[in-house]
Image (spheres, rainbow, N blue to C red):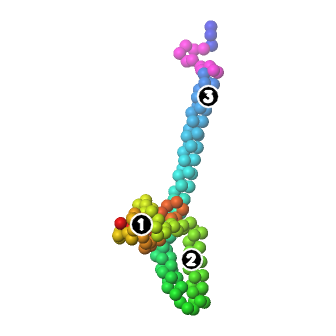
Amino acid sequence: MSNTKKGSKKPTLKDQIKTLESSVTEEKDKFLRLFAEFENYKKRTSKERLDLYKTASQELMTALLPVLDDLNRASNEFSKSKEKALVEGFSLIKNKFSDTLKTQGLILIEVKKGDDFDAEIHEAITQIPAENDKMKGKIIDVIEFGYKLGDKIIRYPKVVVGN
């Protein structure tokens, strides 16, 4: 007579090993998914933090651009003065302010009279008749300088185009 009862079958060692291996595989899969989720979370929050920093910097730079414009206009007027010490002192202040903005990533968009007009880079304020055919479609005058912060244009240069 045998010691095993009919109907109650005891799992074999192989069955137990298979069950444990499948449990380990499931747990490993859960762990890998959780780890991947966590890595994605870290990347996403890092990117969001960087975007927030860039946005805050952009808002500040945009707010300071009118001050820079005023300093440039004042510098042009001061350069007409006969008091050299006053001109030099103001020039030092303006340059220090400009250099500080440059160190924070602000880049002047270089635009000169006679450059080709490009709607992707320039903002045309008005068109005036060109002095000659060579100046048609070219920049006649620069009304307001444009600036980039990194690779992004935060203010387009405002120009007058020859027609």
Does the rendering let one see residue 40? yes
Observer-side mark, 3 or 1, equals: 1
- Magenta includes 12? yes
Mark 2 → mark 3, Cα distance in angstroms: 67 Å
Which residue is situated farthest in the bottom direction here? 83
On residue 135, the disc is 1
Tag 3 secondary structure: helix
In the rendered image, residue 132, in percent from the top left (x then y), is placed at: 39, 68
- Magenta includes 132? no
Compare marks 2 and 3 and give the one earlier in the sequence. 3
Compare marks 3 and 1 and give the one earlier in the sequence. 3
Question: Residue at coordinates 54% horizontally, 47% vertically from top-left?
Answer: 40
Crowding at dot 2, Cα within 10 Å, few <14 / some 14-19 / many 20+, comes out as: some
Instruction: Report the magenta residues as a range.
Output: 4-14
Q: Main secondary structure of the magenta part?
A: loop
Residue occupied by mark 2:
97
Mark 3 → mark 1, Cα distance in angstroms: 79 Å
Which residue is more in the foreground, 9 or 5? 9
Question: Residue at coordinates 58% horizontally, 78% vertically from top-left?
Answer: 95
Residue occupied by mark 3:
21
In the rendered image, residue 86, in percent from the top left (x then y), is placed at: 57, 89
Q: Is residue 65 above or below residue 35?
A: below
Question: Residue at coordinates 57% horizontally, 51% vertically from top-left?
Answer: 42
Q: Amino acid at mark 2?
A: Phe
Q: Is residue 142 left or right of residue 7?
A: left
Location of the C terminus by quadrant is bottom left
Observer-side mark, 2 or 3, equals: 2
Compare marks 1 and 2 and give the one earlier in the sequence. 2
Q: Is residue 144 above or below residue 6?
A: below
Crowding at dot 3, Cα within 10 Å, few <14 / some 14-19 / many 20+, comes out as: few
